[in-house]
Structures are given as structure tokens and as C-alpha cells.
Image (tube, helix red, strand yellow):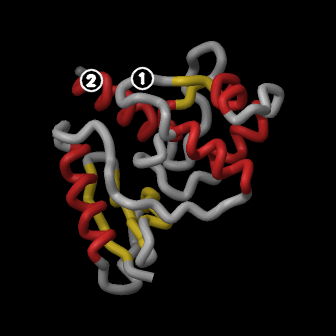
């Protein structure tokens, strides 16, 4: 699968894409190298990541090729509704999926998000406003939230 690397201020980001869209976007803690040459979607994503991290992009338009269960997909679609620089809670996301009692399941789907940053799982907080879980590490979640707050219109 075509891949590419982006050196962000908070670590290396690995991007993988099919011919239909981005399939994975995750942080790496080193030692990774692309498996294959990028394609036009990987290149578009890398450009948009550069714009995002430099404060010039508040939304992504790169195509996505999300793969998961029907519930996971519903959670990830709900995450895409959280505006740049804003946050939501697991409970609100559960309500948006039509399963208001599925708060823990939302947390699981959030954790399984294969396309971090673009599908903004970092914008989900605990019901008390606390930073809770982030596959890339809480230090990255805090950085992303602070970065978006800085550039929010």
C-alpha cells in the first residue's frame, strides 16, 4: 500500500492510502520507513498535514477510505462533525450515533480510529472536560488541542 512520512512538531506521522483514500494516519515513535512509494492521495495528505501543522488549514479535504464495523464508521463520521478548535465528549458522540448509552463503545471506536488528526479523535474529552486516552499519547492530544485553540477563528 502506498505510504509516506511527515515530520510533525510532535513526531513522525505515517500515512497510508489506497487508490480510494487515506486508510491510515498514525504517529510513529521512530524506526519506520514507508513500505512503498506514495500515490496522489498520500501526496495530497502530506501537503494538507503541512498546512495543518503550520496553522494554515482548519479542515481536510483529502479522500478517506475508512474500514471498520458499522458502529465504528458511525463514530468516526460523528468525529468529523466536531469543528476545528472545539471539543466534544464521549457521551455526545454516543448520542450522535443514536446509541446514547454506548459511551464505552464510543471510547473503543475512538481508540481504533485509523486516521488520527483528520478524523479528529483528539477533540474528544471526558465528561468532566479531562484529557482521556489518545493512541498517540496524551502529550500529543494536548499539543493538538492547544495548536487548534491558537489558530481557531
Pinpoint residue 58: horizontal percent, then vertical percent. 28, 37
Residue at left 16%, top 39%? Answer: 56
Please, what secondary structure does the residue beneath circle 1 have? loop
Residue at left 36%, top 30%? Answer: 84
| For residue 90, above or below residue 25 | above
Residue found farthest to the top: 128
Residue at left 48%, top 24%? Answer: 87
Front residue (pair 80, 135): 80
Pinpoint residue 57: horizontal percent, then vertical percent. 22, 41
Residue found farthest to the bottom: 36
Q: Quadrant of residue 85?
A: top left
Q: Residues within 10 Å of mark 1 (few under 14, many from 20)?
A: few
Specify which label sits upstream in the sequence, 2 or 1.
1
The circle on residue 152 is 2
The circle on residue 86 is 1
Residue at left 78%, top 35%? Answer: 104
Name the side, left or right, on which 106 lies relative to 50: right
Q: Residues within 10 Å of mark 2 (few under 14, many from 20)?
A: few
The quadrant of the rendering that contains the N terminus is bottom left
Front residue (pair 53, 139): 53
Q: Quadrant of residue 98?
A: top right
Name the side, left or right, on which 45 lies relative to 126: left
The circle on residue 132 is none
The quadrant of the rendering that contains the C terminus is top left
Cα gap from disc 2 to disc 1, whole angstroms: 8 Å
Pinpoint residue 118: horizontal percent, then vertical percent. 41, 48
Mark 2 touching mark 1, by CB under 8 A? yes
Q: Quadrant of residue 101?
A: top right
Amino acid at each position: 500500500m502506498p505510504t509516506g512520512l511527515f515530520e510533525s512538531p510532535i513526531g513522525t506521522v505515517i500515512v497510508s492510502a489506497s487508490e480510494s483514500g487515506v486508510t491510515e494516519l498514525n504517529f510513529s515513535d521512530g524506526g519506520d520507513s514507508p513500505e512503498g512509494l506514495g500515490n496522489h492521495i498520500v501526496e495530497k495528505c502530506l501537503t494538507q498535514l503541512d498546512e495543518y501543522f503550520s496553522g494554515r488549514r482548519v479542515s481536510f479535504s483529502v479522500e478517506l477510505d475508512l474500514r471498520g464495523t458499522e458502529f465504528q464508521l458511525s463514530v468516526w463520521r460523528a468525529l468529523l462533525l466536531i469543528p476545528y478548535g472545539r471539543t466534544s465528549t464521549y457521551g455526545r458522540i454516543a448520542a450522535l450515533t443514536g446509541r446514547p448509552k454506548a459511551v464505552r463503545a464510543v471510547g473503543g471506536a475512538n481508540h481504533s480510529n485509523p486516521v488520527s488528526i483528520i478524523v479528529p479523535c483528539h477533540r474528544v474529552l471526558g465528561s468532566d472536560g479531562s484529557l482521556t486516552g489518545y493512541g498517540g499519547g496524551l502529550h500529543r492530544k494536548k499539543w493538538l488541542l492547544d495548536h487548534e485553540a491558537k489558530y481557531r477563528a
